[in-house]
Image (cartoon, rainbow, N blue to C red):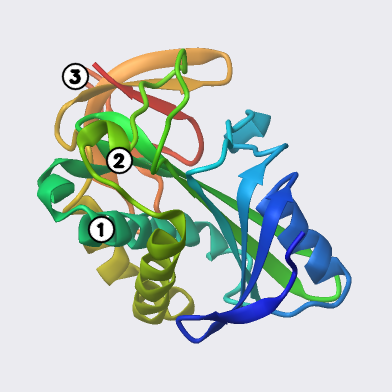
Amino acid sequence: MNRDVTDLAGIRHRAYGALGSTSAEALALARAGERGPLWISAAEQTGGRGRQGRSWASPPGNLYATLLLTGPSTPAVAPQLSFVAGLAAHDAISASAPTLARDLTLKWPNDVLLAKRKIAGLLIEAESQSVFAVAIGIGINCASHPVDTTYPATDLAANGVAADPATMLLGLARAMKVRLQQWAGGSGFPAIRADWLARAASLGETIQVCLPGRQFAGRFDGIDETGRLLVAPPGGRPEAIAAGDVFGL
């Protein structure tokens, strides 16, 4: 393992050859007294994870990184970091692959899509012990992508773009720095929300929403001032949804 701390766009960076999970490592370091901001990356993960405990395939060649932040905001607004990170990932991929930029969109709550296929995923995890710590985990499919997934996936190489994970990480770190400054601990969320909606997948279209115990179709009307999904069923008023899975129809 390479645990040397280096500089990444002005932020400390700890790079590993392999880890179970960059986010798990980030939170473990926070419990041990580490204070962010700190980037943690790995060439591969043996226990990568996504939302709701799903596994995240993590072979070499793709980007696996987590930004550890301590006390970035109040816990109540920390979930907004999913939109901040989504925009940063969109920015970084667009800069790395400008020919594909027009086909990149953001899927609520935490994915980047390329031509309606998942090319990047995000996971926000937080813990409050001696300090409020947030781990922003980001995976970008540079060289490969998983198959037989619930939502179709793709990667940059499959779309004719050679992307080095280290170069992509540098671009991501720079974009994240800009987006975090824009967010400003939550006070700048209206601007983040507007930028996210400008890149939103399926806005105004019919989507399928899967919630525990039920699922329904409705028109995607955007996100509210806190980031909740707004979906209007046929003939009904928009419903605000804090957590769930979304699929385009």
Query: Disc 2 designates what residue?
Result: 156
Q: Is residue 72 left or right of residue 161?
A: right
* Quadrant in the picture for residue 216: top left
Q: Position of residue 88 (x, y in %)?
A: 35, 62
106 or 217: nearer the viewer: 106
Sequence order check, earlier mark of 1 and 2: 1
**Considering the numbered disc 2 on the image, is that residue within a helix, a strand or a loop?**
loop
**Which mark lies nearer to you, 3 or 2?**
2
* Quadrant in the picture for residue 31: bottom right
Q: Position of residue 63 (x, y in %)?
A: 49, 50
Q: Which mark is residue 235?
A: 3
Q: Position of residue 51 (x, y in %)?
A: 58, 36
148 or 60: nearer the viewer: 60
Amino acid under label 2? Leu
Sequence order check, earlier mark of 3 and 2: 2
Q: Is residue 19 left or right of residue 243?
A: right
Query: Disc 1 designates what residue?
Result: 96
46 or 183: nearer the viewer: 46
4 or 245: nearer the viewer: 4
Q: In this view of the protein, can residue 84 be seen by the observer?
A: no
Amino acid under label 1? Ser
* Structural distance between the alpha carbons of marks 1 and 3: 43 Å
Q: Is residue 6 left or right of residue 165?
A: right
- Residue 83 to residue 128: above or below: above
Q: Which mark is residue 45?
A: none
Question: Marks 3 and 2: CB-CB under 8 Å?
Answer: no
